[in-house]
Image (cartoon, rainbow, N blue to C red):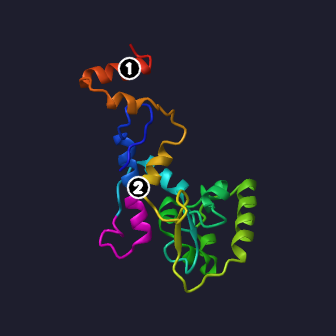
Amino acid sequence: MQTIATRGLGVSNLRLAGYALQTRWLWLQKTDQDRAWSQLPIKVDTKVHRFFRASTLTVVGDGRSTLFWDDNWIDGQSAQDIVPALSQFVPARTRRQQTVRQGLTDRQWVRAIAGGVSVPTIADYLSLWELTEAIQLSDQPDRTIWRWTPSGSYTTKSAYNMLHTGAIKFHGHRLIWKTWAPLRVKIFLWLAFRRRH
């Protein structure tokens, strides 16, 4: 993996590199159902799940591999984000398991709603009804798109770069690494550049 010069000596941030690699597991689980472990629950950091959700959108085909409530399939957004008041009344297990195909068949998503509802919930219900009314499924498989590459396919480098978005770049790291000084001197120079005496 290429190093990104952010807040340091041009050394990869191992925590963020780990997040990028965990994101790859989620990508493969979503896009490659033939892998033996694809149906197993994968334990990854909740931040990784959030990053994956923000980084992907789905073009719905047959609706078999897209989650109705959690995946970004309605104009690049998830039902959970579009109708947050309503989604609170859907059990977590249903949100994790109900596919678009299952939800749209005989409007099964309506039966997933449990508990008393409020006025904002009814408004959300009507919005979701209208958004899903015209959706037609096809015979093509669903397609997950990675937002951060032109091809729409996941790369660890693109994930790592996006995890660094907003970081302060330190352009002097190359000069520090090129010096013939011992490592402790290089670290001292880095601290001096960062004004950490």
Name the amino acid, label 2. Thr
How crowded pointer 1 is (Cα within 10 Å; few <14, some 14-19, many 20+) is rated as few
Q: Quadrant of the C terminus?
A: top left
Vertical comparison of 106 with 95: above or below: below
- Residue 81 placed where, x, y %? 63, 56
Rendering coords of residue 192 (x, y %): 40, 17
Give the left or right position of residue 52, taking residue 188 as reference. right
Q: What element carries label 1?
A: helix
Outermost residue toward the left in this view: 182
At horizontal 41% and vertical 55% (from top left) the residue drawn is 156
Residue underneath mark 1: 191
Q: Report x, y in % for residue 69.
A: 57, 64
* The furthest residue to the bottom: 139
- Identify the mark at residue 92; answer none if there is no mark: none
Query: Which span is picked out in magenta?
Result: 23-40
| Callout 2 secondary element | helix
Residue closer to the observer: 60 or 160: 160
> Callout 1, which amino acid?
Leu
Q: Which of marks 1 and 2 is in front?
A: 1
Foreground: 101 or 194?
194
- Is 126 one of the magenta-colored residues? no
Query: Which residue is the site of mark 2?
Result: 156
In magenta segment, residue 24: yes
Residue in the image at 39% along x and 66% along y: 28
Q: Where is residue 151 in the image (x, y as percent from the top left)?
A: 52, 66
Which one is nearer the viewer's eye here, 3 or 92? Answer: 3
For this orientation, the residue located farthest to the top is 197
Category of crowding for the residue at label 2, using alpha-carbon neighbours closer than 10 angstroms: few (below 14), some (14–19), many (at least 20) = some
